[in-house]
Image (cartoon, grey):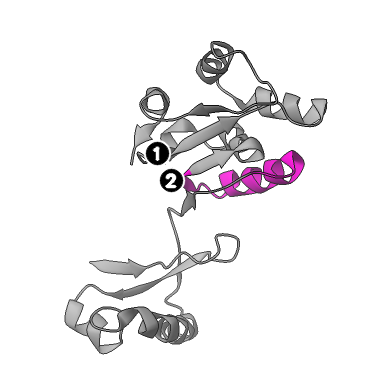
């Protein structure tokens, strides 16, 4: 059995995992586990990656997980493009904190079965500053989420926060 080391640093750059021995003793020898392994990983992973690449041992990552937390949004167009690209790569998304405003455009691109939520997860829905941005957001929400928003007065300048337990009606727990 091969074990894959995959330290998420920047989802835009990380595209490969390195096959490593499943044997913990072998992993300890190269500093990936054990005392002080956090600082050693910063050194060991680039070295192992270079050796593995040279040997042709690098394999594509099959499932990449993006953690979303404390995301206050921004340009809807930029978020729309970013999440479209990530969806094309087949990423999974773990909501571990607030995802508000333009961040919620991820719901237009990532299928619900690829999204999970933690107890701290929250979606903040509101009226965007531009009508076309609001239309982009609204078009990306499922009928159920649209009904949830409408039951709370619709999109307005004030945030409508979806948290537990409501969030569990739409997304699975991580």
Inspect the magenta stretch and tell me whether residue 81 lies in it. Answer: yes
Q: State the residue at coordinates (25%, 81%).
A: 27
**Image position of 88 (left or right of 144):** right
The numbered dot on residue 41 is none
Q: State the residue at coordinates (44%, 81%).
A: 42
Q: Which quarter of the figure is the N terminus placed in?
A: bottom left
Q: Is tag 2's residue or tag 1's residue first in the polypeptide sequence? A: 2
**Image position of 38 (left or right of 130):** left
Q: Quadrant of residue 31?
A: bottom left
Q: Position of residue 34 (x, y in %)?
A: 23, 80
Cβ–Cβ below 8 Å for labels 2 and 1?
yes
Inspect the magenta stretch and tell me whether residue 58 lies in it. Answer: no
Viewer-nearest residue: 29 or 62: 29
Q: State the residue at coordinates (54%, 10%).
A: 151
Residue carrying label 2: 94
Residue carrying label 1: 117
Q: How many marks?
A: 2
Task: Relative to 166, say whether 65 is above or below.
Answer: below
Viewer-nearest residue: 72 or 58: 72
Task: Relative to 168, say whether 96 is above or below.
Answer: below
Viewer-nearest residue: 153 or 52: 153
Q: Which quarter of the figure is the C terminus placed in?
A: top left
Element assignment for label 2? strand
Query: What is the span of residues highlighted in magenta in the rendered image?
Result: 73-97
- Alpha carbon separation for disc pair 2 and 1: 6 Å
Task: Relative to 81, say whether 15 is above or below.
Answer: below
């Amino acid at each position: 059995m091969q074990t894959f080391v995959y330290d998420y640093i920047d989802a835009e750059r990380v595209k490969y995992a390195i096959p490593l021995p499943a044997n913990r003793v072998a992993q300890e020898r190269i500093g990936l586990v054990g005392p002080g392994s956090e600082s050693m990983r910063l050194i060991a992973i680039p070295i192992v990656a270079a050796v593995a690449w040279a040997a042709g041992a690098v394999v594509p990552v099959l499932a990449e997980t993006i953690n979303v937390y404390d995301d206050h949004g921004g340009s809807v167009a930029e978020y729309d493009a970013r999440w479209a690209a990530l969806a094309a790569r087949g990423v999974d998304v773990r909501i571990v904190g607030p995802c508000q405003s333009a961040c919620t455009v991820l719901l237009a691109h990532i299928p619900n079965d690829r999204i999970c939520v933690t107890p701290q997860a929250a979606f903040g829905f509101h009226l965007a500053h531009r009508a076309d941005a609001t239309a982009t957001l609204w078009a990306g929400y499922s009928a159920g989420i649209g009904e949830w928003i409408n039951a709370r007065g619709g999109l307005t300048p004030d945030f409508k926060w979806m948290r537990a337990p409501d969030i569990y009606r739409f997304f699975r727990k991580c």
